[in-house]
Amino acid sequence: MGKKGKKEKKGRGAEKTAAKMERKVSKRSRKEEEDLEALIAHFQTLDARKTQIVETPCSPPSPRLNASLSAHPEKDELILFGGEYFNGQKTFLYNELYIYNIRKDTWTKVEIPNPPPRRCAHQAVVVPQGGGQLWVFGGEFASPDGEQFYHYRDLWVLHLATRTWEQIRSTGGPSGRSGHRMVAWKRQLVLFGGFHESTRDYIYYNDLYAFHLDTFTWSKLCPSGTGPTPRSGCQMSVTPQGSIIIYGGYSKQRVKKDVDKGIQHSDMFLLKFEEGREDRWMWTRISPSGAKPTPRSGFSVAVAPNHQTLLFGGVCDEEEEESLEGDFLNDLHFYDAARNRWFAGQLKGPRSERRRRRRGRKVEPEGADEQEHEGAGAQEPLQVVREVVADDGTVVTIKQVLAAPGPAARPPSPGEDSTDEGGSPAVGPSPRSNAMLAVKHGQLYLYGGMFEAGDRQVTLSDLYCLDLHKMEEWTALVETDPEAQEWLEETDSEEDSEEAEGAEGGGDEEDEGGEQQHPWVTPGEQFADSLPRTEQYWVKPARPDNARPDAEEERVLGIARASAIAAFHDST
């Protein structure tokens, strides 16, 4: 009894501490959220002027991350909503709605009266009821300078058949947050985690809520057992057996005053009903086998046709005393809940390449092939790592993870060509985080995301497709030119009118300052015209007064330049 009593008191103490921290964060953030509410209300007034549905064929959407990409339950369409973009000085938030027609390979911008306010890092879930519904909860709005945040706690539904937005007002739901995860489970929307951040404080959540689609009511779930610690950006998916999986995620922890430490979680939990009871959930920590993903944040998640959960990319930030290394990834992993096992996604390559490899394969002694297959299963994923140095001395690590070679993806032997018959390098999405994924008819679609190069954030607008049944190669549907993006260096102050315009979002941003020197090229230095723009990524180290380098420095710079170009050759 004594031990049990102590445990109960400890649990209640932790709950009180969490509640106290939440009240503290709420109080400090209330003032800044009130300031942002006025800006949000202004934008809603502009949206209210729209009185009819307007569908306009358009070019692909502008670069963005932390949007939502969803597959229409009945049509061959993808639905893109919201997102954010940062140009170095201003943060742009969107509430635009785009429809991508898969068969026609065309984009349409759909303007609907009274849409949700501009947001990013929300969650969107599609259900088939009523001709298809897109449910959206939460997310955040940021001030133009990116220093203040407003976290939504609203719930919206887009009726796809009638092209109408509806806000669902129901009490008892989650607090305002972003970075949470939400899935459709039977006739419910189940929501987990997320975070709330103000200028000086933050709080991460591990609470669990269910929204009932029949009654339009919220309920807070209190499972038994030890569940995940507070986090955001995790993997949340429903298994074929009807359970829910939580994997990974990110959180911050304050180690001392004004010093925070980021935590990249790599644990996994199973949420299911207790034995013999279908009214009470329970948490169980599980340890899957197989080729587990390396710890990371900002990864993207979708569900494959065989009910396996797939995970793409992300970033691993490693903080050291004198450098910050950001390892952006573009690897693919699959989790099989039935076997509780991770698998590395291995692409077989084009059929023409596989035929050439078979023709060029030498005759091997009997049993050699069997030994090779056995050894391949134990190999770890290959990592290609290159480093360059930014203007401020920051070490930028460009890291690409390649699946370990196996029977279906044998590395080329000496003399074999790694390209297809046309001599073109393999196509695929470059390393990135916070991309958007959706699966339709066994095809995986990947849109946008971002990576960093020194102090610059490169936001992407490309679209790729991968046949998950064949697992041969990526197809580029929309290609992006990161160099064409505007990037403005930080200034000490900006006029309020410019800030309001920047936060509104949805418009095309143009550089009015004339042609700018490429931020990654030394003054007077240019790349050969034959080099694709997507490979023009060399980060120059700073030199006093723009002095020319000596011979040794020229040699080092040449190595850095060549490494950066080679890295992007590998990733494109």
Image (tube, grey):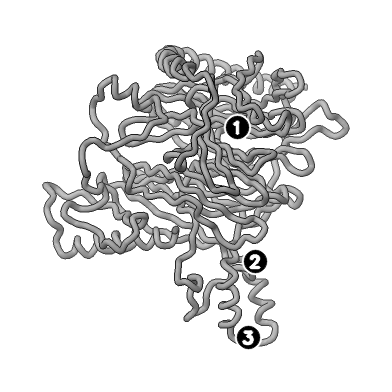
Q: Position of residue 403 (x, y in %)?
A: 56, 61
The image's mark for residue 377 is: 2
Callout 2 crowding tier (Cα within 10 Å): few <14, some 14–19, many ≥20 = some
**What kind of element bears circle 2?**
loop
Q: Amino acid at mark 2?
A: Gly
Above or below: residue 79 compared with residue 431 = above
Q: Nearer the viewer, mark 1 or mark 3?
A: 1
Q: Is residue 259 left or right of residue 486?
A: right
Residue type at tag 3: Glu
Mark sitting earlier along the chain (2/3): 3
Q: CA distance from mark 2 to mark 1?
A: 37 Å
The answer to which of 373 and 415 lies nearer the viewer is 415
Which element carries disc 1, helix, strand or loop? Answer: strand
Q: Which mark is residue 364?
A: 3
Q: Residues within 10 Å of mark 1 (few under 14, many from 20)?
A: many
Is residue 29 visible in the rendered image? The answer is: no
Nearest the eye: 522 or 20: 522
Q: How far across and down, in percent of the image, does residue 205 sit? A: 58, 27
Q: Nearer the viewer, residue 512 or 383?
A: 512
Secondary structure category for the residue under label 3: loop
Q: Is residue 219 above or below residue 180?
A: above
Is residue 571 among the parts visible in the rendering?
yes
Q: Residue at x 14, y 61 (%)?
A: 550
Q: Give, as a three-letter code, the residue at label 1.
A: Ala
Alpha carbon distance from label 1 to label 3: 53 Å
